[in-house]
Image (cartoon, rainbow, N blue to C red):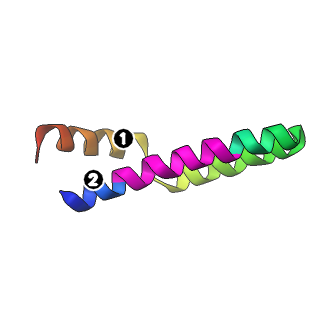
Amino acid sequence: MGYEMLQFDMIVAAEISDRIKEQHDEANSKIDANRAVARRNQKRSERISQKDMGNFMEQWASGE
């Protein structure tokens, strides 16, 4: 259970990092923002699917 919680924390941290980077890129240049969004979407698709995250959250909430 601890490893899954660590993975969840890392996913959340990565998402926060992506959002901060995206905001920074948008502030620097609108063209770069489009690239940042594409990179963010690519990274999101490579990470964990929403279905898997939902299953993980259900397990975590039930204490399994």
Query: Quick one: quadrant of the N terminus?
Result: bottom left
For numbered disc 1, what is the local secondary structure?
A: helix
Residue 60, can we see it? yes
The residue lying at 36 percent from left, 40 percent from top is 51
Residue 48 in the image: x percent, y percent? Answer: 43, 51
Whether 14 is among the magenta residues is: yes
Q: Is residue 34 visible?
A: no
**In the rendering, which numbered label is found on residue 51?**
1
Q: Which amino acid is tagged 2?
A: Met
**How packed is label 1: few (under 14 Cα within 10 Å), some, or many (20 or more)?**
few
Residue 11 on image: x %, y %: 44, 51
Mark nearest the camera among 1 and 2 is: 2
Residue 34 horizontal/vertical position (percent): 80, 41
Magenta stretch in the rendered image: 8-21
Q: Which residue is mark 2?
A: 5
- Picture coordinates of residue 53, whole percent (x, y): 35, 43
User: N-terminal of the two: label 1 or label 2?
Assistant: 2
Answer with left or right where residue 40 lies relative to residue 3.
Answer: right
Are the residues at dot 1 and dot 2 in contact (C-beta closer than 8 Å)? no
